Every structure is written in C-alpha cells, then in structure tokens.
Amino acid sequence: MANETSPLIQSDASVSGSIQKAKIVSRRKGHSDLDLSLKIHPIRKDLNVLRDDNAIKNSIKNLLITNAFERPFQPQLGANLRGLLFEPADAITKIAIKENIKDVIKDYEPRVSLISIAINDLSDQNAYRLTVRFLIKEYDTQDSVEILLRRLR
C-alpha cells in the first residue's frame, strides 16, 4: 500500500504542458438588485432586475436618498441629505453634504472607492445637483451617479 498514491497526487502528476500556456481565470461576483421603478419586463411580465454595475449604481443612489430612521432595524443607514436642503446655501452646507456622502458610502458600500463629489448649487430652484464619481473595485471601472435634491416647500 505504500506504493499506491492518492487520486489527488495522481491527478497532479498527470498534468502536462508548460506553465506559461496555463491561464488562471477568475469569475467576477455577479451583483443584482431590483429596479425600484418597478417597471414590468415586456416579454417576461416580471420585474426588471439590475445587474453588476447598474446594481451598484442603484445601491449608491438608494443610500444617498435615504434619511436616517427610514429603514426598520437600520436607523443609522442613509446620508441624511434632505434635512440639509433647508439650511442656508453656503459653503458650510456643501461641506456637510460632502461629509454625509463620504460617510455613507464608506460605511455601507464596500464595493466602490469614492473619487469625487461635485455639488452644484441651484439656489433659484431651491435644489442641489450632486454628481458622485466612484471606482467599482471589482470591475476596475469608473462610474457616476447624478441626483437632483430639491425641496418642495
């Protein structure tokens, strides 16, 4: 029995060829999310599903428009941007918006790395246009999300 080798060793010994020709293939982890617009797929008659980078963009958008205490059992989740709309439109408010965005993405979206946050003050419309640029770590691609924050009162 000492001369017998295990199947694992036999399979390793049977590998032939050069190492340079061998390729290591890794799979990307697929991400999926429901499209919250709740549009129906025309053929399947089912809800649309967002995949990969679109799912990540949707997740970031949801984090930005969520306020604290809106989600059950996750009271800290959200960027709390709606409350800052009623503050004076000055540099301090812009800094607070940027910090809230940085914190929520750092804490709740580990799949991305933040690149930049652009805030355009639209005082005549009582709004801010936010453009958040980020790097999706797994795909090594840059993408952005644009949101118009408006107060309605």
Image (cartoon, helix red, strand yellow):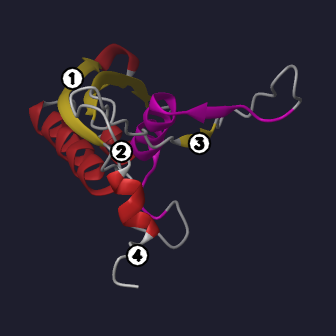
Are the residues flagged by discs 3 and 2 in contact, CB closer than 8 Å? no
Seen at 33% across and 39% down, the residue is 16
For the image shown, how many numbered marks are present on the structure? 4
Residue 48 magenta-highlighted: yes
From this view, report whether residue 131 is shown above or below residue 69: above
The residue singled out by tag 2 in the image is: 15
* Mark pair 1, 3: CA separation: 26 Å
Q: Using the image as rendered, state which of residue 151 and residue 109 is in the foreground.
A: 109
Using the rendered view, name the quadrant where residue 139 is placed: top left
Closer to the eye: label 2 or 4: 4
Residue 60 magenta-highlighted: yes
Magenta residues, as a range? 46-69
The residue singled out by tag 3 in the image is: 33
The residue singled out by tag 1 in the image is: 118
Q: Picture coordinates of residue 31 (x, y %)? A: 51, 42
Q: Disc 1 residue type?
A: Ala
Q: Disc 3 residue type?
A: Asp
In the image as oriented, which residue stretches furthest toward the bottom?
Answer: 1
Q: Could you classify mark 1 by the number of other residues whose Cα lies within 10 Å: few (under 14), some (14-19), or many (20 or more)? A: some
Give the numbered dot on residue 4: 4
Q: Picture coordinates of residue 68 (x, y %)? A: 41, 60
* Mark pair 1, 4: CA separation: 67 Å
Q: Is residue 116 left or right of residue 78?
A: left
> Reading the chain from its start, which is encountered first: label 4 or label 3?
4
Q: Disc 4 residue type?
A: Glu
> Reading the chain from its start, which is encountered first: label 3 or label 2?
2
Are the residues flagged by discs 2 and 4 in contact, CB closer than 8 Å? no
* Mark pair 2, 4: CA separation: 18 Å
Closer to the eye: label 2 or 1: 2
